[in-house]
């Protein structure tokens, strides 16, 4: 089914971000207490992930993290 294969591709792309946050971004075992602090760490982590991903897509970043 064509819709199912598309769904699998999109799901993999989304899960890559969360996997990166857990391994590289330090969210596997956070030391922060409180919803606001954790939200800030999550926002910072996803912002860094997006910057690295944009750099990889545009060609100015050759890192192997993404």
Image: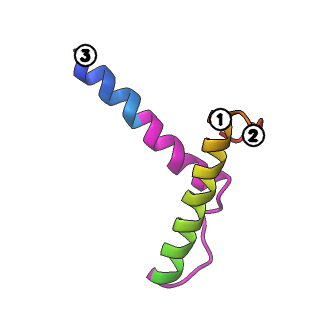
Residue 28 visible in the snapshot: no
- Dot placed on the residue nearer the N-terminal end, 2 or 3: 3
> Which residue corresponds to the image point at 44% horizontal and 81% vertical from the top-left?
35
Q: Quadrant of the C terminus?
A: top right
Q: Are marks 1 and 2 in contact (CB under 8 Å)?
A: yes
Residue 40 to residue 58: above or below? below
Q: Which residues are magenta?
A: 12-35
Residue at numbered disc 3: 2
Answer left or right for 54 relative to 59.
left
Query: Left or right of 10: which side holds 30?
Result: right
C-alpha distance separating marks 3 and 1: 29 Å
Alpha-carbon neighbours of circle 2 within 10 Å: few (<14), some, or many (≥20)? some
Question: Vertically, is 55 above or below 6?
Answer: below
Q: Residues within 10 Å of mark 3 (few under 14, many from 20)?
A: few
Q: Pointer 1: what residue?
A: 58
- Say which element carries label 3: helix
On screen, residue 3 above or below 29: above
Provide the residue designation for mark 2. Answer: 61
Question: Do callouts 3 and 1 mark residues in contact (Cβ within 8 Å)?
Answer: no
On the question of residue 8 being in view, the answer is yes
């Amino acid at each position: 089914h064509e819709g199912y294969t598309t769904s699998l591709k999109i799901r993999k792309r989304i899960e890559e971000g969360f996997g990166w946050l857990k391994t590289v971004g330090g969210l596997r075992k956070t030391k922060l207490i409180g919803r606001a602090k954790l939200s800030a760490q999550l926002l910072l982590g996803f912002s860094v992930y997006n910057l690295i991903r944009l750099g990889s897509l545009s060609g100015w970043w050759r890192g192997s993290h993404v």
